[in-house]
Image: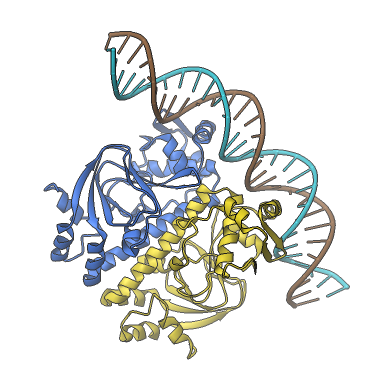
Chain colours: A blue, B yellow, C cyan, D brown
Amino acid sequence: MRPHELPEIRHLPLFRDMLQANFEALMHGAYAQAFPAGLELMRQGDPADFLHVVMEGAVELYAHWGGRECTMAVVRPVGTFILAACIKDAPYLMSARTLERSRIILLPSSDLRAVFRRDTEFAVSVIHELAGCYRSVVRHAKGLKLRTSRERIASYLLRQSALAGNLASYGLPVEKRLLASYLGMTPENLSRTLKTLEADGVKLDGTRVIITDRAKLSALAQPDRLIDGPDSETPSAGASLPRVQGGD
Amino acid sequence: MRPHELPEIRHLPLFRDMLQANFEALMHGAYAQAFPAGLELMRQGDPADFLHVVMEGAVELYAHWGGRECTMAVVRPVGTFILAACIKDAPYLMSARTLERSRIILLPSSDLRAVFRRDTEFAVSVIHELAGCYRSVVRHAKGLKLRTSRERIASYLLRQSALAGNLASYGLPVEKRLLASYLGMTPENLSRTLKTLEADGVKLDGTRVIITDRAKLSALAQPDRLIDGPDSETPSAGASLPRVQGGD
DNA sequence: CGAACCCTTGACAGAAATCAACTAAGGTGG
DNA sequence: CCACCTTAGTTGATTTCTGTCAAGGGTTCG
């Protein structure tokens, strides 16, 4: 592990309140590893042996069933994933692969479970983390069930604009096909719908998003803090940049 | 609160491991209340002041946006809901209404937060509960994104059959329109698709489900423990009967 | 008995997946 | 440096699926 990484981890909401001794114990069993882009880190159904912390790069969490596949979330530095499976000592519900070359720290889940049993502050942090993850997925599910794909795209674009500081123009953080899968549609559908959205105040130039009429776009997307969420409640990554939507 | 209710609550996974003194403290601020059917218990966006424990009856958790509405879960005795919002002291993401006449116990969320800060065993229970809720919603989202509505219906019917002890015939625990909403479709769509499923090994007679060819139905539904879940991981309600799928 | 309400069915319109072809960009290897 | 290959993205044609609107049958409950 690199010298600058330890304090970065320590400052994560998940680890910042625990006793130093326990933090050190937890980190003692940890090890960092670099992975090339496109590597499958875990497959759904595998036993959960390690909590993963993304230090550099990006990781896609996805699910598959009956030959189909869909993106569930993207985790960026500094964020953690598969906390829930580690805690329950249960099989992963999602697979994970690197989207770029990534550095990831692995914490043995048995250590994790041992430490929160003796460190109440850490237990409270885990509780908050899980509650945040839970609410994040509920929001995702609400979006899928209540909004049309057109509305999901519009609100996604507005949400990203907000994350970029309410800029009218910003770059998409992920490939379009991944975005389509995350939003629950096919790439063809996304492509076509994006084109029709030009009439509603947003235009795409390659990977560049240009909001031409925010009011109009908002009228369509009807952003709602109970779906799109306030920044304060972004899941694992505290002040970082979960560009698609984190989660565990 | 009734005399028999306290031990029932005490035996819930969420409360069974905490210190007796803390359990008593928690219950001191609690009160039970009876509600008629069809009453809105809370509206999404409201502040989370009470953890709810369903002792009798049934509660529907649902979400709304832009004039639309959808069912997210049904909670039955003995189960809890909105734990996550209580912990984060954040607004509810879902509304709740009684489906039948129900008895519900309300625990002030401030007491809850105070107690798990000083009772590690309780904190660990909360962690497990939340992790279970999280995994439950992830499964729901996976079903929505990976399966067609036809497949969702088929696997739902098989899942319920399993809960009923793998009976070939059992009664639907909820109204069809609610089921449709839970499964992410319109009542009309459910009605029509159910009819076509007669060719795939399942028949409905009113509210009665009759599985005529389990192998054929399974081939269509392709039940998957990473979506449909093993019983052991049902969310809040331990050995109880979360007929649609619990959750918080 | 009447009024809701649930469920079903039909007809239709809209949305989305699928299949296929084509472009453009990036990377590889000669 | 160029030819080649791979892959993301777009576009079109088509089919399938799904939501919507409307009407009718059945049940429950006041």
Q: Position of residue B6 (x, y in %)?
A: 44, 86
Q: Is residue A244 left or right of residue A19?
A: right
- The one nearer the camera, B205 or A154, is B205
Q: Position of residue B68 (x, y in %)?
A: 59, 54
- The one nearer the camera, A177 or B49, is A177
The answer to whether residue B114 is visible is: no
Q: Position of residue A47 (x, y in %)?
A: 34, 57
**In the image, what residue occupies the spot 43% across and 51% down?**
A228
Q: Is residue A13 left or right of residue A147?
A: left
Q: Is residue A68 above or below residue B116?
A: above
- Say how many tags the image has: 0
Q: Is residue A6 left or right of residue B188?
A: left
The answer to whether residue A172 is visible is: yes
Q: Is residue B23 above or below residue B147?
A: below
Q: Quadrant of the C terminus of chain A?
A: bottom left
Which quarter of the picture shows residue B82?
bottom left
**In the image, what residue occupies the spot 44% across and 81% down?**
B9
- The one nearer the camera, B63 or B223, is B223
